[in-house]
Structures are given as C-alpha cells and as structure tokens.
Amino acid sequence: MTKRFILDRFEDGFAVLYGGDGTSSFTVPKFLMPNGAREGATIVQDDSGAFSIDTLDTNARRDRIARKMDDLFS
C-alpha cells in the first residue's frame, strides 16, 4: 500500500513530510528524497519504502494554489 505525503521543508539534513490529513508530520533523512524533490511536492512511498515524486499531483496542487492566489489578489 502506497502512502502519500507533502514535502513541507528541508531542515538540518532532514525532509519534513506531512501526511494526508495535514496534521501529522515526521522527518526522514534528506538523502532518501528523490532527485528534484522540492517543498510542496507530493511524495509517494511505495511498499518497499522507496520515495518518489507524484508529478501529476504536485502540478495539480500548484495550479490550484496559483488560481486561489490569483482570485485572492485580483
């Protein structure tokens, strides 16, 4: 079963991830993050424990936030 997280930030050599509920967080060593992982990315952990970026979900979330910002400031 895959797990989904949002990459909140990098801090002191660790990645801070938030779970799907948005309230639970935990850290993992930064070196476990896939290449190109940035703050705000949707991170998926597969059954083997490997992390990858869900590019489609990450882009959809960024587009949704950009639209909300446009609506707010226009």
Image (cartoon, grey):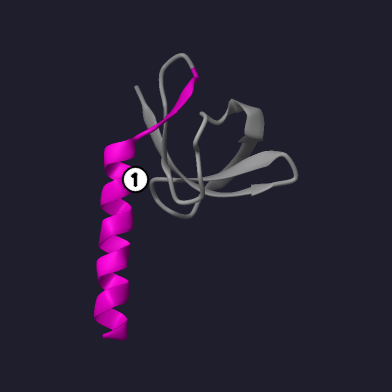
Which element is circle 1 on?
A: helix
- Seen at 26% across and 50% down, the residue is 60
Magenta range is 49-74
Q: In which quarter of the image is the N terminus?
A: top left
Residue 30 lies in the magenta-colored region = no
| Above/below status of 16 relative to 23 | above
Residue 38 coordinates in the image, percent (x, y): 51, 45
Q: Taking the image as drawn, is residue 29 in sight?
A: no
Residue 71 coordinates in the image, percent (x, y): 24, 79
| Above/below status of 4 relative to 58 | above
- The three-letter code of the residue at mark 1 reads Thr
Image-based side of 12 in relation to 45, left or right: right
Image-based side of 72 in relation to 16, left or right: left
Q: In which quarter of the image is residue 63?
A: bottom left
Between 6 and 73, the one lying in front of the other is: 73
Q: Taking the image as drawn, is residue 42 in sight?
A: yes
Image-based side of 70 in relation to 51, left or right: left
Which residue is farthest bottom? 74
Residue 56 lies in the magenta-colored region = yes
Main SS, magenta residues: helix
Label 1 neighbourhood size at 10 Å, few (<14), some (14-19), many (20+)?
A: some
Residue 55 coordinates in the image, percent (x, y): 33, 37
Between 36 and 47, the one lying in front of the other is: 36
Q: In which quarter of the image is residue 70?
A: bottom left
Which residue is farthest top? 48
The residue at which mark 1 appears reads as: 58
Which residue is farthest right? 12
